[in-house]
Amino acid sequence: AGGMSRHATRCLSSMLFLRGRGADTADASALADLRLYPRWAPQPLTVSWSPAPFNRYEMSATLLSNCQTPCPPIGRMLARAYQMHAAGAYAHQYAEHGVGAGEFEEAFSRVEDVLAAYRSM
């Protein structure tokens, strides 16, 4: 693979779906570059192909990637959720359905753990 920026987004894994003429011989080596994935990723890239065209296109490719791109918006969402929780926003409505402070703390903790794992890739 060619040179890669040292600021490239890292992925936990990617899945490439190729359809149509030549799908079985398409070069996916750029997506297989191990620098895109953490060392501990069990199966960084999976490629699936079919000779059948998709939606009358002669060839098509779809990439599904689990990467760091959502970290900034998730961080902003979490900060806003903390602010709303501290202000008691909608607390009475959650309480009516049996959701209390403990459930919120557990949910916040889980999101923080996931966000930390993605940021550390």
Image (cartoon, grey):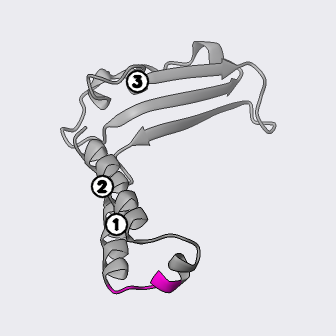
Residue behind mark 2? 112
Q: Earlier in the sequence, mark 1 or mark 3?
A: 3
Instruction: Tell me whether circle 1 and circle 2 mark residues in contact (CB < 8 Å).
Output: yes
Q: Earlier in the sequence, mark 1 or mark 2?
A: 1
Instruction: Give the extent of the magenta segment.
Output: 87-92
Between 103 and 90, which is closer to the camera in this rendering?
A: 103
Residue behind mark 1? 78
Q: Position of residue 20 (x, y in %)?
A: 72, 24
- Left or right: where 117 falls relative to 25: left
Question: Could you say whether the residue bearing mark 3 is in a helix, strand or loop?
Answer: loop
For residue 69, which numbered disc appears in the image? none
Question: What's the CA distance linking mark 1 and mark 3?
Answer: 28 Å
Instruction: Tell me whether circle 1 and circle 3 mark residues in contact (CB < 8 Å).
Output: no
Name the residue type under label 1: Leu
Measuring 50% from the left and 70% from the top, which residue is drawn there? 99
Q: Position of residue 103 (x, y in %)?
A: 42, 63
Measuring 41% from the left and 27% from the top, which residue is drawn there? 31
| Number of numbered labels in the structure image | 3
Name the residue type under label 2: Glu
Please state which of the two labelled residues, at mark 1 or mark 3, is closer to the viewer.
Answer: 1
**Mark 2: few, some, or many residues within 10 Å (few <14, many ≥20)?**
some
Residue behind mark 3? 44
- Left or right: where 24 falls relative to 82: right
Reply above or below: 74 against 92: above
Report if residue 61 lies within the magenta region: no
Instruction: Tell me whether circle 3 and circle 2 mark residues in contact (CB < 8 Å).
Output: no
Question: What's the CA distance linking mark 1 and mark 2?
Answer: 8 Å
